[in-house]
Image (cartoon, grey):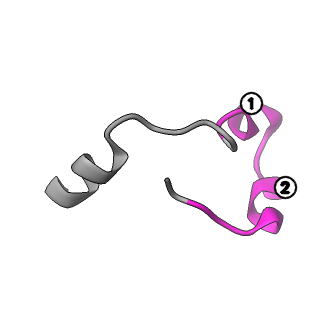
Amino acid sequence: MPTTIDEKWDELSTDQQKWRYKAFPYYDDLYAIY
């Protein structure tokens, strides 16, 4: 799961912040491909 510091999340809109604690399915597999 990708992570970042809290200050970066604070810069995003509330609509984008909904993704803060959600896992992305197949992230590791897709990361290896791309």
Q: Is residue 8 above or below residue 10?
A: below
Q: Is residue 12 above or below residue 4?
A: above
**Residue 29 horizontal/vertical position (percent):** 23, 48
Chain-order first, disc 1 or disc 2:
2
Q: In this view, does 34 lie to the left or right of 5?
A: left
Q: In this view, does 30 lie to the left or right of 20?
A: left
Q: Give the crowd class for mark 2: few <14, some 14-19, many >=20 residues within 10 Å.
A: few
* Type of amino acid at the residue the image marks with label 2: Asp
Q: In this view, does 14 lie to the left or right of 5?
A: right
Q: Give the crowd class for mark 1: few <14, some 14-19, many >=20 residues within 10 Å.
A: few
**Residue 20 horizontal/vertical position (percent):** 69, 44
Determine whether label 1 and label 2 are within 8 Å by CB. no
Q: In this view, does 20 lie to the left or right of 31?
A: right
Residue span colored magenta: 3-19
Instruction: Name the mark on residue 10.
Output: 2
* Type of amino acid at the residue the image marks with label 1: Asp
**Residue 19 horizontal/vertical position (percent):** 64, 37
Nearest the eye: 10 or 31: 31
Label 1: which secondary element = helix
Seen as rendered, the residue at the extreme left is 33
Label 2: which secondary element = helix
Instruction: Name the mark on residue 5.
Output: none
Residue located beneath label 1 in the image: 15
Between marks 1 and 2, how big is the CA–CA gap?
Answer: 12 Å
What residue is at 75 percent from the left and 63 percent from the top? Answer: 8
What residue is at 60 percent from the left and 61 percent from the top? Answer: 3
Q: Does the magenta stretch include residue 24?
A: no
**Residue 24 horizontal/vertical position (percent):** 46, 38
Q: Is residue 7 above or below residue 21?
A: below
| Quarter holding residue 17 | top right
What residue is at 79 percent from the left and 41 percent from the top? Answer: 13
Quadrant position of the C terminus in the picture: bottom left
